[in-house]
């Protein structure tokens, strides 16, 4: 005979259970909704209790027609259902009643029940993350051999692509994703879930939107680089790709005191922890070897010959300006600071122990949460190297030393240190015709750097601002700067040039001459330049006249213009003679140089326009 506690009748077996839970929300484990007899969800009203709000233009005052759609992402998954017949809590009842009405187990129905209970049509991202196992599928505890709390770990979803978890974790940082908000909302979105129990295949479809507030000066504190990296499929990065050419070294594992993990069935005493860490040393060593092997592949690409005559791994910058390259450069600079910002020694010890057991942060009873340590700091928090692969976090978080690339040599090697400082991280330029001297390697790098800043199609701003990948069906272009953590609808200004700031005696003059020779003005002014405007102001056909100094061009105001391909050098009056003498000594055609200063200078624009380099002073220019 059944004893009736309260009027909560199981929709399957008909058993009455006392369910001590609230009707509005679903707890992390969901076990409070289970029938105490058969272990399945007791009431249909407990399905889809935790739902979000779909994105519509009318849902809140902040969602308007001028919101910008950032696209749609689909995450595929399968369900691993829990079998209550194998649980200590429900095994006896199933052995007694299985086969009777309401006591027939169907795996497909259990998959559908899990989906309906935890997700429904509009699930929360947190609930999705809490349904992903924290350990590999083969390491999930068997509920028969462990405590009853492990029943909650026996049902879970498996993502089709492991990288999808990084996207979920980044979207989970959005405070109002799928929630109602009325002011200061910069990024909104929603997620819709679907599931086919006959095929055991489901999808989460995410949508992301910018609101006009994203373009304000006081932009969000959210790390947009990591969000965009995950949304557009750039992250997670391979650590060896960010630390190009770096060599990892094993660090000394500290003495381990007893650390309480507090997550059944992973509680370990001191002896078990020390034994586990001995095994973990092998794992760390393998990770170091794997990292160093991957780093070696970059070395042929990073060869740099220093003035010492030695070749080594010095690092060559990737000067591509597409969105993926922009984020790669940004995180390559950021990674060193993030590694140095690791937790305290106690945190690291707990991370070693937890990581050795394959534990992560998201999942019901296996979550770690105490006053001193939260495992999410090491595995899921945005500040904790979220943008690198999970297997690389062992290197970054467990004390393994990752030095700055130093040509493969030890840091106490003076020649290696000088070689590292000498390398600018740019490929050397080609041989410069017109010079009677050969540039040093660092000077060739400077010239190549300057050439890139003068010839970049979209100007130097393209190194800092990149257009977000275009979303199909949208016409609005959005530009993003990871350093400023800003987005803009305005294309960055087209600016070319830069500052050569070498110290005295390192060859700024010969570098400038090489730049002039390697990047002369084109035969005709480029479209959109100021010189083109002068051409366009002339009535008639100027085709073929080019930069000929014999041709003058009159504008509407009656003042003539002579367009020159030359370069104007401005310096202090005391340096004009010195600059010209040094330049002539290094040019195969010294006649290219022409001084223009002093009271006896020839004030003939045609003569000035006929020289490649004109040297003058600030006073002359302002007079």
Image (cartoon, rainbow, N blue to C red):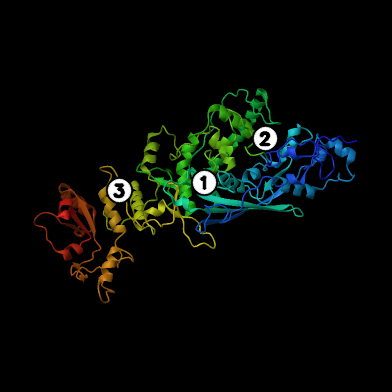
Residue 500 got which mark?
3
Q: Nearer the viewer, residue 84 or 514?
A: 84
Q: Which residue is mark 2?
A: 366
Question: Who's the residue at 88% across and 36% down the image?
Answer: 2
Q: Residues within 10 Å of mark 3 (few under 14, many from 20)?
A: few
Question: Who's the residue at 58% across and 39% down the image?
Answer: 380
Task: Tell me if residue 603 comes above or below residue 14 in the rendering.
Answer: below
Task: Report x, y in % for residue 206.
Answer: 60, 53
Q: Residues within 10 Å of mark 1 (few under 14, many from 20)?
A: many
Q: Nearer the viewer, residue 149 or 348?
A: 149
Task: Report x, y in % for residue 116.
Answer: 72, 48
Q: Nearer the viewer, mark 3 or mark 2?
A: 2
**Could you give the CA–CA distance between mark 3 and mark 1, rounded to whole angstroms?**
33 Å
Task: Tell me if residue 351 comes above or below residue 42 in the rendering.
Answer: above
The C terminus, quarter of image:
bottom left
In-image side of 291 versus 161 (left or right): left
Quarter residue 350 falls in? top right
The answer to whether residue 352 is visible is: yes
The N terminus, quarter of image:
top right
Quarter residue 254 falls in? top right
Task: Report x, y in % for residue 71.
Answer: 56, 56
Q: Which residue is mark 1?
A: 226
In-image side of 406 versus 511 (left or right): right
């Amino acid at each position: 005979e059944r004893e009736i506690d309260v009027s909560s009748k199981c929709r399957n077996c008909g058993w009455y259970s006392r369910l001590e839970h609230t009707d509005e929300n679903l707890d992390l484990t969901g076990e409070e909704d289970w029938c105490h007899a058969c272990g399945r969800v007791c009431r249909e009203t407990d399905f889809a209790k935790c739902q979000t709000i779909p994105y519509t233009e009318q849902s809140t005052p902040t969602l308007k027609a001028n919101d910008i759609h950032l696209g749609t992402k689909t995450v595929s998954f399968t369900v691993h259902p829990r079998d209550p017949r194998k649980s200590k809590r429900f095994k006896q009842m199933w052995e007694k009643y299985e086969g009777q009405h309401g006591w027939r187990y169907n795996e497909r129905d259990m998959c559908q029940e899990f989906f309906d209970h935890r997700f429904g049509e509009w699930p929360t991202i947190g609930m999705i993350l809490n349904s992903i196992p924290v350990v590999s599928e083969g390491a999930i505890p068997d509920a028969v051999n462990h405590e009853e709390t492990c029943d909650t770990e026996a049902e879970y979803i498996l993502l089709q692509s492991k990288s999808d978890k990084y996207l979920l974790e980044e979207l989970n940082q959005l405070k109002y994703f799928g929630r109602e908000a009325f002011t200061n909302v910069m990024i909104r979105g929603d997620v819709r879930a679907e599931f086919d129990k006959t095929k055991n295949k489901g999808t989460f479809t995410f949508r992301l939107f910018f609101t006009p507030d994203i373009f304000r000066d006081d932009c969000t504190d959210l790390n947009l680089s990591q969000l965009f990296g995950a949304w557009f499929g750039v992250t997670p990065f391979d650590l060896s790709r960010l630390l190009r050419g770096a060599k990892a070294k094993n660090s000394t594992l500290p003495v381990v005191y007893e650390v309480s993990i507090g997550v059944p069935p992973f509680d370990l005493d001191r002896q078990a922890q020390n034994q586990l860490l001995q095994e973990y040393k092998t794992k760390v060593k393998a990770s170091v070897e794997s990292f160093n092997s991957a780093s070696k592949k970059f070395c042929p690409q990073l060869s740099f010959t220093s003035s010492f005559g030695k070749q080594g791994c010095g690092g060559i910058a990737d000067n591509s300006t597409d969105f993926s390259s922009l984020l790669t450069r940004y995180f390559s600079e950021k990674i060193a600071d993030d590694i140095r910002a690791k937790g305290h020694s106690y945190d690291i010890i707990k991370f070693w122990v937890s990581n050795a057991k394959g534990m992560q942060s998201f999942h019901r009873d296996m979550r770690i949460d105490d006053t001193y340590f939260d495992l999410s700091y090491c595995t899921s928090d945005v500040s904790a190297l979220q943008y690198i692969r999970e297997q690389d976090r062992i290197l970054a978080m467990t004390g393994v030393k990752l030095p700055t690339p130093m040509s493969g040599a030890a840091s106490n090697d003076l020649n290696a240190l000088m070689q590292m400082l000498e390398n600018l991280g740019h490929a050397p330029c080609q041989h410069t015709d017109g010079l009677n001297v050969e540039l040093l390697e660092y000077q060739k790098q400077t010239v190549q750097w300057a050439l890139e800043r003068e010839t970049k199609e979209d100007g130097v701003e393209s190194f800092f601002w990149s257009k977000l990948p275009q979303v199909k069906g949208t016409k609005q272009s959005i530009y993003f700067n990871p350093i400023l953590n800003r987005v803009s609808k305005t294309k960055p200004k087209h600016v070319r040039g830069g500052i050569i700031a070498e110290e005295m005696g390192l060859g700024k003059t010969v570098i400038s001459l090489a730049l002039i020779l390697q990047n002369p003005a084109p035969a005709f002014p480029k479209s959109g330049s100021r010189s083109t405007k002068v051409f366009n102001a002339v009535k008639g056909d100027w085709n073929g006249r080019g930069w000929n100094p014999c041709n003058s061009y009159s504008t509407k105001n009656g003042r003539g213009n002579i367009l020159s391909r030359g370069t104007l050098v401005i310096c202090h009056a005391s340096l004009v003679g010195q600059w010209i003498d040094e330049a002539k000594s290094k040019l195969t055609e010294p006649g290219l140089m022409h001084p223009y200063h002093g009271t006896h200078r020839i004030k003939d624009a045609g003569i000035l326009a006929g020289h490649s380099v004109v040297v003058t002073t600030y006073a002359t220019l302002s007079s």
